[in-house]
Structure formats: C-alpha cells, structure tokens
Image (cartoon, grey):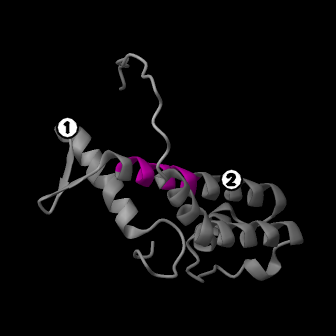
Amino acid sequence: GASPGSTGGGIKTSTFAIVILNLWRNLTGKDRLEVFKREIPDSVTQQALAVLVGGISFVVLGYFMLLLFEDHPPLDLLFETVSAYATVGLSTGVTSSLSYAGRIVIIVLMFAGRVGPLSLGLAIGRRHAKGKYRYPRGNISIG
C-alpha cells in the first residue's frame, strides 16, 4: 500500500498499521489503542477496519469476476487484480490479452482502489447527529 497523502491506491500503510495494532490490542486485552504515547480513538479504528474490509471485498469480487470472464492461470489473475486495486502498475503480461469484460473489471478496480478507500473513509468519518435515546448494551461472545 501507499503512504497517506500520496497518490497511490489501495489500502494505506497507516490504515494497515492501525488494523494490526488493534488486533494486538485485542490479543493483549487492553481496553484502548495506544501508539507512541498517544491514544487512537475507536472511531479511527472502526474507519480503518471498514476501509480494509471494503478493499478486500473489492479485490475478492474483482478476482471472481476475472475468473468467470477469463481463461488465464488463476494466480496470474489474482496478481492482476491486486495490482490493479493497489494501482502499482505491475503485471504478469495477461492484461493485454484480457477480454473487454476483463479490461472493464481491471479499470473499475483501479478506480475503486484510488477513490474507493478514500471516499469510504471520509463517508464513515463524518459526524452524525447523536440519537436522543440509547438501547441497553448487549454482550455477545466472540470467538
């Protein structure tokens, strides 16, 4: 992934770092995320997880679409999919031989990789009006 503020697409390195640090926080049983003597708000963690899940969803959906449309080795198609989403410009050489449907999938992945995570992060990060009521909290066992 690219670093924040760059023109690279895909999931940013800071987003990935927040997700990994949040995983470590959960494994160690801490109640808040602290990095370099700073506390990271839960809203930032939720935003990072949403961007990660959205990015993985784009890649998986694009990969399955390419598997449906194309007759190339699956590993080559996976490489093309991830490369397109991350907008890194690398290829195994099958891009030029893709069908029109496959090329459209690659184009959409490149667009989604550049605009998707950023837009999703901004949309989730907006402040919403607080409700006038709250439901009781429920504990659910996760494991």
Residue 61's label in the rendered image is 2
* Label whose residue precedes the other's in the sequence (1 or 2): 1
Q: Nearer the viewer, residue 130 or 25?
A: 130
Going by the numbered disc 1, the residue's amino acid type is Asp
Task: Tell me the residue at 54%/73% (across/down).
Answer: 9
Q: Look at the numbered disc 2 and give the secondary structure of its residue.
A: helix
| Furthest residue in direction left, as rendered | 37
Instruction: Say which of marks 1 and 2 sits in front.
Output: 1
Count of marks, rendered view? 2
| Furthest residue in direction right, as rendered | 100
Magenta segment, prevailing SS (helix, strand or loop) = helix
Residue 119's label in the rendered image is none
Task: Tell me the residue at 44%/22% (across/down).
Answer: 133
Q: Is residue 19 visible?
A: yes
Q: Report the quarter where the C terminus lies.
A: top left
Pointer 2 local density, CA inside 10 Å: few below 14, some 14–19, many at least 20: some
Residue linked to disc 1: 31
Q: Relative to 130, say whether 135 is above or below.
A: above
Q: Is residue 83 left or right of residue 30?
A: right
Residue 7 is covered by the magenta coloring = no
Magenta stretch in the rendered image: 45-56
Going by the numbered disc 2, the residue's amino acid type is Leu
Picture coordinates of residue 137 (x, y %)? 36, 19
* Distance of label 1 from label 2 (alpha carbons): 34 Å
Task: Tell me the residue at 55%/80% (across/down).
Answer: 88
Task: Tell me the residue at 54%/65% (across/down).
Answer: 118
Picture coordinates of residue 45 (x, y %)? 36, 50
Q: Nearer the viewer, residue 58 or 92?
A: 58
Q: Look at the numbered disc 1 and give the secondary structure of its residue.
A: loop
Q: Quadrant of residue 67?
A: bottom right
Q: Relative to 26, say whether 142 is above or below.
A: above
Pointer 1 local density, CA inside 10 Å: few below 14, some 14–19, many at least 20: few
